[in-house]
Amino acid sequence: MARILIVEDAQELLSLVAGFFESKGSFDVDTASDGNTALNLIGSNDYDIAILDIMLPGASGFDVCKALRSKSKCPIVFLTALANESNILKGYEIGADEYMVKPFSLKVLYAKCLALLNRTDTGLQKEIVLECSGIKLYPMRMEVEAEGKKIILAPKEYFLLKVLMENKGMVLGRERLLDLVWGIGFDGSDRVVDNHIKKLRKNLGKPGEAIKTVIGGGYKIV
């Protein structure tokens, strides 16, 4: 699991971004709403990646970036409302790997962070692990553990579990699961999802109880 620092002074946005990353089960998230707190966190912790706002109470995001870069080669993403060229260039000059301007897409931000981690010697080189209720899924190895024991799953069961864990807590309808796992245009009954869910639960044992049926909705993992 990669450790990420998210620094943002707007509390609602901070909670939104942190919650999104936490929901994926792939990140251990630390947050700060001002620059000085961020500097203290950097001084006492090691991070695999950081997302920084620039305009912050106390030390600026640029100051935080410099401090982090002085001790780490981890990827740094600026997420800011400052869209002028001089700030963008300064961000890259002091060590940022990516510069995103608000408003932004959470999914794109998440994808950029995964891509950056995949290209570094930190973070995903340790391998991101999706975790939920005693289940661990290793995307890079395509392996699954339940309560510490390796579980052998058929390919469709594996990808079904992966989709559920990537969308932890969200209800996914049968049609959506068919599109994501069997492919758009699959010519078959959506009951194939029910059959594979049944097999998946059985193979996972007790942790499989985390896969919940939502009447009239579909399935989710909690």
Image (cartoon, rainbow, N blue to C red):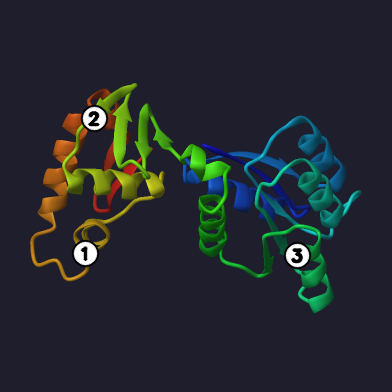
Q: Measure how far apart labels 3 and 2 are at the Cα level.
A: 44 Å
Instruction: From the image, state whether disc 3 or disc 2 is nearer to you.
Output: 3
- Residue placed under numbered mark 2 in the picture: 151
- Residue placed under numbered mark 3 in the picture: 92
Q: Measure how far apart labels 3 and 1 are at the Cα level.
A: 40 Å
Q: Residues within 10 Å of mark 3 (few under 14, many from 20)?
A: some
Which mark sits nearer the N-terminus, 3 or 2?
Answer: 3
Which amino acid, by three-letter code, is at mark 1?
Gly
> x, y percentage for residue 159?
26, 49
Which amino acid, by three-letter code, is at mark 2?
Ile
- For residue 161, which quarter of the picture? top left
Vertical position of residue 187 compared to residue 129: above or below: below
- Residue placed under numbered mark 1 in the picture: 183
> x, y percentage for residue 94?
81, 59
Q: Residues within 10 Å of mark 1 (few under 14, many from 20)?
A: few
Q: Are marks 3 and 1 in contact (CB under 8 Å)?
A: no
Task: Name the residue at 24% across, 43% down.
Answer: 158
Of residue 117 and residue 35, the one placed in the foreground of this image is 117
> x, y percentage for residue 131?
42, 35
What residue occupies the far left of the structure in this picture?
188
* SS for callout 3: helix
Task: Name the residue at 27% across, 60% down.
Answer: 180
* SS for callout 2: strand
Regarding residue 123, the answer to whether it shows in the image is yes
* SS for callout 1: loop
**So how many labels did they put on this image?**
3
Of residue 218 and residue 33, the one placed in the foreground of this image is 33
Which amino acid, by three-letter code, is at mark 3?
Tyr
Which mark sits nearer the N-terminus, 3 or 1?
Answer: 3
Task: Name the residue at 72% across, 60% down.
Answer: 78
Of residue 184 and residue 75, the one placed in the foreground of this image is 75
